[in-house]
Amino acid sequence: MKLDNIDYKNKIVKEYLNYLEKIKGYSKNTIISYKTDINNYLNYHKNNNQNYYDIEDYIQHLSKNKYAKTTINRKIISISTFFKWCKNKKNLNINELKKIKNLRTEKKLPSVLTSNYINKLLDTIPISTTKEVRDRSIIELLYSSGLRVSELCNLKIGDLKNNKSIRVLGKGNKVRILPVTNKSYKLLNLWISSYRDNYKNKDSSNYIFLGVRGKKISSREIQRIVNLRLGTFPHSIRHTFATHLLDGGADLRVVQEMLGHSDPSTTQIYTHVSQKQLKEKYKRTHPRG
C-alpha cells in the first residue's frame, strides 16, 4: 500500500506522531519538528511516489535554498524514521531509504563560560523584585543542575525535595534526581514561599516557574531571560555546568547521568572542551609553554 491518497496520508502521519508521543515519549517541540519536516517533504513530492531519487532531489532542493547542513540532517532523520515506521508498522514499501547519508558537518565545541565569569554575572542579578527573584532562581538552577530548558519549564513544586535535590522528567519520560546547590536551593524556596504568589492567578497550576500571566513559563521566555541577564543562551549554561564538573574531576558517567544522556558519546564532547581548556591553561602557566 502506498501514500497515494491525501486523507490516508494525513491519517498515517497523525498515527506516527501519536506513536512518537505515546510510545517514544518525545517532547511536544520534537513532535512539532517531525510533523513539519515530514509534511514539508510530502508536500514537495505531491505524487507521493517515494524513492531514493525523490529524497536526493529534495536534499538538493534544501541545499540550493541555503538550509544549514545540520537542519538538512535533521530533516533526513525525520523523513527516514517516518518511512521506516511506515514499512514496519503499515506495510508500506518505501525503496532505498537506507542509502541516504547525512551531510558531513563540522563538529562545533560548545561555548563555555569560566567559573569566575558566570559567578560574577550571577552575583550581579539583584533579588529585590518578584521578577528578579524568579529570573535569578531560574539561572541559578540551570547552572546548579544542568537542566534542559524544557525540563525546567515542566518542574512542579512537588519536584523540589527537602534534601536539596530536584526530581526531573527528561527525554523519553525518564526520571532523574539531581542535587541542587545551596544558593540555588535557598533561592528556589524564597521564590516559592515569598514571591511566586505574585504571579499566581486562578488559572495557575503547580508549576514552579510562572510567566507574568500566571501560566507555566515558556521555553522562549527562559531563553529571553538568560540572554537578557547573562548575554548568552540556556544551552551554554548547560555546557558550562558539564564542563565545570569534568574540570573538577567528576567521572564522565556521572556527568552523563546528570545530563540525562542515554548515549555516552553525546557526553564525550565535553571531555574535548575540558582538554582544550587544559591545553590553554598549560600554555599560559608553564614557563616553556
Image (cartoon, grey):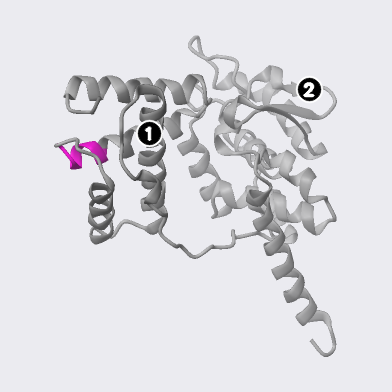
Say the numbered circle drawn on residue 82: 1
> Could you say where residue 14 lies in the image, as x and y percent from the top left?
33, 21
> What kind of element bears circle 2?
strand
Does residue 69 appear left or right of residue 184 in this picture?
left
Sort mark 1 into few (<14), some (14-19) or many (20+) by Cα contacts within 10 Å.
some
Of all residues, the one furthest to the top in this rendering is 202
Disc 1 residue type (three-letter): Phe
Magenta stretch in the rendered image: 40-46
Can see residue 124? Answer: no
Q: Position of residue 268 (x, y in %)?
A: 68, 55
Q: Which one is in front, 257 or 146?
A: 257
Compared across the picture, whether 152 is left or right of 38 comes to right
| Residue at 35% in and 34% down | 83
The crowding category of the residue bearing disc 2, from other C-alpha atoms within 10 Å (few below 14, some 14 to 19, many at least 20), is some
Identify the secondary structure beneath mark 1.
helix
Secondary structure, magenta segment, majority class: helix
Which residue is found at the position 49% from the left and 35% from the top?
219
Label tally: 2
Q: Nearer the viewer, residue 27 or 144?
A: 27
